[in-house]
């Protein structure tokens, strides 16, 4: 089996070190909002939700990936565009007629290659230095060097452990870092945009925003002004609000795409025969809105999954086992996949970065509601569906204002 570097580093390093990364991400998120949304406590400011969330997610992610480029605005300009062009190009290439697909792909790569090159100008020298420092430390026990607690150092350490020349190539590592940026930035930016539009278009008397703010304030106080992994596990309302948004405003209409590879094909339990090469998938959109699985399935209920937990006085750490087929515990946390919640995939190929995404998104929402007021929307701007993909309105705006009493974390 081929070595999957990204999955390996995520599972072996990122997921195991999440607790130690929370303070840095919290600090970066607070700095992001202060820079992009301002500190004016008197006047409302119009912000473009998707644009700002792309910048915030990019910075918070790179605080974990490599803090040396974390606040480099030029790097982020091109980094965000790499993520956008990868997503757009993938869709356009798939939609193109097979006869022209190859030539069309080469044409589409031109702007992507330019932004990739510009990102590499900043990232490649850092990669080379990290390779030199970590390599020297492995050879010279007297060399004093403390490896940064970051994704770049982990991917370099993994490369040295494997001793594969390709894995140790600085250009390859730079490429892998940019792929990781795409995986972290684009889906999470869409997700958090949907969360905010769903949350702030809900009727204020439902108490969703105030409930999340009360929860964040309480957890922050329990942590002596700091968020911790144990504290985030107690943020059941915030977790539920994100999961419910992912259920209702999914990124795609289908999931678990597979191709039948067996030469003899596959016969389903109901007798349907699928020959080799057949492409199959699962109707994610329909499952997520099925009334037999979710009551009032077409309604955004931010606390759908948190009410049972609060009634039982439990936190998210108690939910570990995957549910049986066709079942989903009513207190399910964001990271728990099943055959009726497929936004992160399901089974052994489920997204390994979902634990990082969960922590990041909860910290982002906590930072937002603690430090800012947001005017409720009269109606929820509609998402746009293009083929199998759902996109939030990229120009939708919110009005925000700095709160006079902030979270101060």
Image: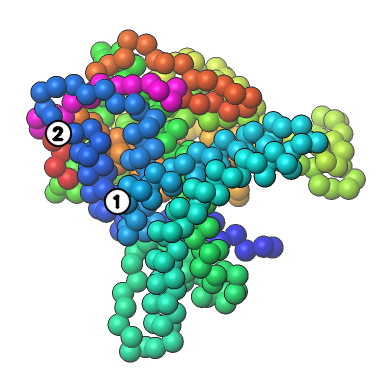
Circle 2 residue:
39
Image height check: is 369 above or below 146? above
Q: Secondary structure at mark 1?
A: loop
Query: Is residue 402 inside the magenta stretch?
Result: yes
Q: In the rendered image, is residue 305 in sight?
A: no
Query: Picture coordinates of residue 92 (x, y %)?
Result: 64, 33
Q: Secondary structure at mark 2?
A: loop
Query: Picture coordinates of residue 314 (x, y %)?
Result: 32, 38
Q: Can you name the residue that lies furthest to the right here?
A: 264
Over which residues does the magenta segment extend? Answer: 393-405
Identify which residue is drawn at 90% across, 45% down.
264
The quarter of the picture where residue 408 lies is top left
The quarter of the image holding the N terminus is bottom right
Q: Could you tell whether 253 is left or right of 309 in the image? A: right
Task: Depth check: give the residue in front, 282 or 372.
Answer: 372
Identify which residue is drawn at 44% across, 22% down.
393
Q: Could you tell whether 171 is left or right of 365 in the image? A: right
- Return the mark for residue 71: 1
The quarter of the picture where residue 94 lies is top right
């Amino acid at each position: 089996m081929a070595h999957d570097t990204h999955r390996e580093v995520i599972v072996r390093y990122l997921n195991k070190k999440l607790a130690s990364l929370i303070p840095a991400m919290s600090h970066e998120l607070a700095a992001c909002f202060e820079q992009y949304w301002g500190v004016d406590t008197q006047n409302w400011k119009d912000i473009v939700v998707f644009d700002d969330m792309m910048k915030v997610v990019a910075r918070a992610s790179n605080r974990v990936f490599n803090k040396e480029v974390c606040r480099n605005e030029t790097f982020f300009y091109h980094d965000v565009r790499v993520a956008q062009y990868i997503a757009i190009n993938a869709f356009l290439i798939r939609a193109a007629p097979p006869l022209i697909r190859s030539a069309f792909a080469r044409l589409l790569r031109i702007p992507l290659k330019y932004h990739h090159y510009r990102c590499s100008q900043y990232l490649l020298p850092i990669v080379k230095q990290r390779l030199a420092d970590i390599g020297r430390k492995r050879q010279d026990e007297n060399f004093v060097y403390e490896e940064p607690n970051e994704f770049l150092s982990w991917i370099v350490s993994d490369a040295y452990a494997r001793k594969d020349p390709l894995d140790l190539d600085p250009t390859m590592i730079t490429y892998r870092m940019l792929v990781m940026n795409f995986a972290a930035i684009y889906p999470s930016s869409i997700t958090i945009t949907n969360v905010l539009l769903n949350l702030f278009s809900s009727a204020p008397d439902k108490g969703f925003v105030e409930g999340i703010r009360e929860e964040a304030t309480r957890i922050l106080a329990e942590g002596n002004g700091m968020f911790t992994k144990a504290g985030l596990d107690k943020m059941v309302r915030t977790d539920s609000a994100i999961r419910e948004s992912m259920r209702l405003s999914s990124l795609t209409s289908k999931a678990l795409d597979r191709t039948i590879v067996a030469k003899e094909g596959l016969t389903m339990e109901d007798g349907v025969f699928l020959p080799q090469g057949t492409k199959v998938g699962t109707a994610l959109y329909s499952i997520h809105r099925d009334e037999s699985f979710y009551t009032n399935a077409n309604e955004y209920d931010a606390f759908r999954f948190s009410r049972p937990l609060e009634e039982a006085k439990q936190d998210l750490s108690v939910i570990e086992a995957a549910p049986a087929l066709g079942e989903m515990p009513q207190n399910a946390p964001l990271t728990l996949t099943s055959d009726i919640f497929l936004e992160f995939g399901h089974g052994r190929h489920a997204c390994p970065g979902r634990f990082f995404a969960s922590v990041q998104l909860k910290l982002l929402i906590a930072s937002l509601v603690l430090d800012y007021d947001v005017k409720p929307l009269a109606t929820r701007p509609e998402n746009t569906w293009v083929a199998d993909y759902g996109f939030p309105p990229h120009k939708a705006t919110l009005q925000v204002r700095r709160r006079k009493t902030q979270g101060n974390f």
